[in-house]
Amino acid sequence: MRHIGLSGGIGSGKSTVAKALEHMGYPVFYSDEEAKKLYATHPLLKKELLALLGKESYQNDVFQKHVLATQLFENPALKEQIAALVHPLVRERFNEWAEQQTADLVFNEAAILFETGAYKLLAATILVVAPLETRIQRVQKRDGLSREAVLKRIANQWADSEKMNLTPYVITNDGQPLLQQIEEVISQLKTHLNV
């Protein structure tokens, strides 16, 4: 079994590719969803976040994402502290989950695999890219954000060109049919990894 990353910037459509992989029979672990669960359920993480962000970060035992967002905006250095708490826990959950799978390839879907260096822990990583305007429109439609807000979020992530230097496996999600591209990348992966 090989662990494969699936990443892409906001609005790239990596979730669409992840769903297609699931329909093809491959297990997909959603790191961002797991992180949300951990914020809510992991006692040690909750204790650390309360110490770091203050008691307003949890109300009625529910993590207040907007409190984190506000504090990150005011103190960008906080991002690394939060990442140092959350990412190892998510990685641990992925490894536990992967051990229970039987497929020859299992996928770890995460927005910032390249930025965190986590891609180095995987056998390979697929990058999903899309034209900038397409990404902006997708995020505006999905999240109801202004164009400026979307561009700010995109600017907080690495450029696709930086990520493309780190993987040969790229899927362009520009509205054209994806299945053929996904099948080609899977074929390349299996050949390269001798699966």
Image (cartoon, grey):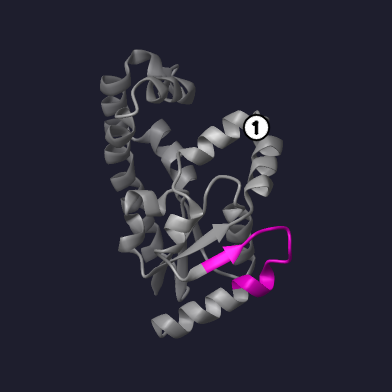
Reply yes or no: does residue 18 show up in magenta: no
Q: Left or right: where does residue 83 sit relative to residue 155? A: left
Q: Could you tell me if residue 14 is visible in this image?
A: yes
Quarter of the image for the C terminus: give it: bottom left
Residue 27 location (% of width, % of height):
51, 64
Residue 52 location (% of width, % of height):
27, 22
Q: Left or right: where does residue 112 sit relative to residue 150? A: left
The amino acid marked with disc number 1 is: Arg
What residue do we see at 40% from left, 33% from top? 39
Magenta residue span = 170-182
Q: Which residue is mark 1?
A: 147
The image quarter in which residue 57 lies: top left
Viewer-proximal residue among 94 and 194: 194
Q: Is disc 1 surrounded by few (<14), some (14 to 19) or many (20+) residues within 10 Å? A: few
The image quarter in which residue 120 lies: bottom left
What residue do we see at 42% from left, 31% from top? 40
Reply yes or no: does residue 178 show up in magenta: yes
Residue 80 location (% of width, % of height):
29, 36
Q: Could you tell me if residue 108 is visible in this image?
A: no
